[in-house]
């Protein structure tokens, strides 16, 4: 990519730009206010006061009390701590109930616990990516003790889950409920008094704070064994010296998200819908993945049938447009996304799925530029593809 080329960043569910306001409040805590908040001296003590104020702002963001907020290194740590810590606290015989479309930060710890002998259930989803609440209730009801982990919204499709109902079910049967709320931060109001979850995870870098800072909400009284052992930081729930500059930045990001949410969501829905309508009008054989009736304002997942999502992403990357495919190519394989597959999307469309995710910094011009270029890329790839609606080739292999 040449350096003069414009960048249209439409991969905000992967990470976001740090807001300049966030950067600005962080810098004094690097070279000036660098004391350790646990120190005896006043130099450290003054930093502890800033951390306390930041904790209040983060607590306001999810409507809990500051004592219920634990700062972690990332949402992966928050998810691991919540699930493993709750299962460890409940002990032998605990059933783990989650969904087939969770982020790996939830699925992998659940599967590790399964390998260690715990019963684990991954609830299937329907064609728009929703779980069956009746099935969930049956699983919770039949468990002696249960830890339930259902994400608030899916990172690949934007499908929003009925977490309020899940929380009610868990409460009714005394199950512990954790939700991965990473993708709703700044996109939907989060109120743990209205939606009585026991634990909740968020990540700074998904809403304009830096990478490397996470939130774990733990309801007062919820039994969760700490994961990081060592010092007495975070009231003994997470050892390790506080990441002060990032905590300060995270609080600013929470404040910006809280104050701008309503206005921003309207704008995002308008831009996202413009992108969606533009794609549907210019590209044949396209399907929108996810629950359009319950979907994050900023997310659009589409399958371009008969072509590869990776090829689309590479071609758009050459034009400065950043998007992602469903598949996390961590192992270098081109396995399609577990989320898209779990939804039963037809195989002609599974490989062609791509995600566009917008943010506060996405402009009308970004959407126009994308719509000017994407149909050409799709047409070009389709011309080269041996597959198509009339093709008798029925497999990609
Ligand atoms: C990004 C993401 C995570 C992981 O967050 P990190 O802070 O990068 O560890 C977990 N869950 C969901 C839904 C995500 O989108």
Image (cartoon, rainbow, N blue to C red):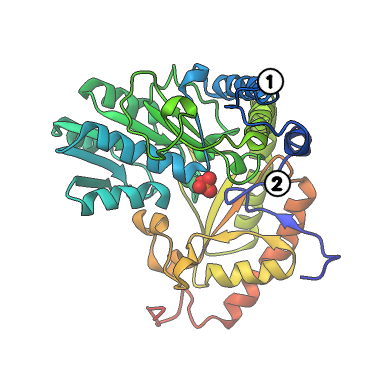
Which numbered disc, 1 or 2, marks the residue that appears first in the sequence?
2
Q: CA distance from mark 1 to mark 2?
A: 34 Å
Quarter assignment of residue 25: top right
| Image spot of residue 291 (x, y percent) | 45, 43
One can see residue 118 in this view: yes
Say what secondary structure mark 2 lies in.
loop
Q: Horizontally, is 60 left or right of 393 in the view?
A: right
Above or below 285: residue 129 = above
Badge 1 density bin: few <14, some 14–19, many ≥20, Cα 10 Å: few
Q: Horizontally, is 155 left or right of 257 in the view?
A: left
Location of mark 1 (residue): 42
**Label at residue 261:** none
Location of mark 2 (residue): 17
| Image spot of residue 320 (x, y percent) | 74, 64
Q: Nearer the viewer, residue 108 or 282?
A: 108
Please report the residue visible at 22 percent of the width from the left and 54 percent of the height from the top. 115
| Image spot of residue 23 (x, y percent) | 75, 39
One can see residue 154 in this view: no
* Quarter of the image with the C terminus in it: bottom left
- Given the current orientation, which residue lies at the most extreme front position? 41
Front position among marks 1 and 2 = 1
């Amino acid at each position: 990519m040449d350096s003069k080329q414009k960048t249209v960043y439409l991969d905000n569910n992967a990470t976001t730009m740090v807001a300049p306001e966030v950067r600005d409040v962080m810098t004094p805590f690097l070279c000036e206010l660098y004391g350790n908040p646990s120190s005896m001296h006043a130099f450290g003590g003054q930093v502890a006061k800033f951390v306390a104020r930041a904790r209040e702002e983060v607590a306001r963001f999810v409507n809990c009390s500051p004592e219920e907020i634990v700062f972690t290194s990332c949402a992966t740590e928050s998810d691991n701590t919540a699930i493993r810590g709750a299962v460890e606290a409940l002990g032998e015989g605990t059933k783990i109930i989650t969904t087939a479309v969770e982020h790996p930060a939830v699925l992998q710890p659940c599967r590790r616990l399964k390998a260690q002998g715990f019963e684990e259930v991954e609830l299937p989803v329907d064609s728009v990516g929703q779980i069956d609440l009746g099935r969930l209730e049956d699983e919770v009801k039949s468990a002696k003790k249960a830890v339930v982990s259902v994400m608030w919204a899916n990172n690949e499709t934007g499908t929003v889950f009925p977490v309020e109902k899940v929380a009610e079910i868990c409460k009714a049967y005394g199950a512990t409920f954790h939700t991965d709320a990473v993708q709703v931060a700044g996109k939907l109001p989060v109120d743990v008094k209205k939606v009585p979850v026991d634990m909740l995870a968020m990540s700074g870098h998904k809403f304009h704070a830096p990478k490397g800072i996470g939130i774990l909400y733990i309801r007062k009284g919820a039994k969760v064994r700490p994961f990081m052992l060592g010092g007495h930081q975070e009231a003994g729930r997470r050892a390790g010296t506080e990441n002060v500059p990032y905590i300060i930045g995270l609080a600013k990001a929470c404040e910006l998200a809280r104050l701008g949410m309503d206005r921003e969501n309207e704008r995002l829905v308008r831009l996202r819908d413009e992108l969606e309508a533009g794609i549907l009008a210019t590209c044949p054989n396209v399907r929108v993945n996810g629950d359009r009736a319950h979907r994050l304002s900023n997310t659009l997942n589409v399958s371009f049938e008969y072509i590869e999502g990776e090829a689309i992403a590479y071609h758009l990357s050459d034009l400065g447009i950043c998007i992602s495919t469903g598949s996390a190519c961590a192992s270098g394989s081109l396995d399609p996304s577990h989320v898209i597959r779990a939804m039963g999307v037809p195989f002609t469309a599974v490989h062609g799925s791509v995600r566009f995710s917008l943010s506060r910094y996405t402009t009308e011009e970004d959407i126009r530029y994308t719509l000017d270029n994407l149909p050409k890329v799709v047409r070009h790839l389709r011309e080269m593809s041996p597959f198509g609606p009339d093709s008798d080739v029925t497999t990609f292999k």
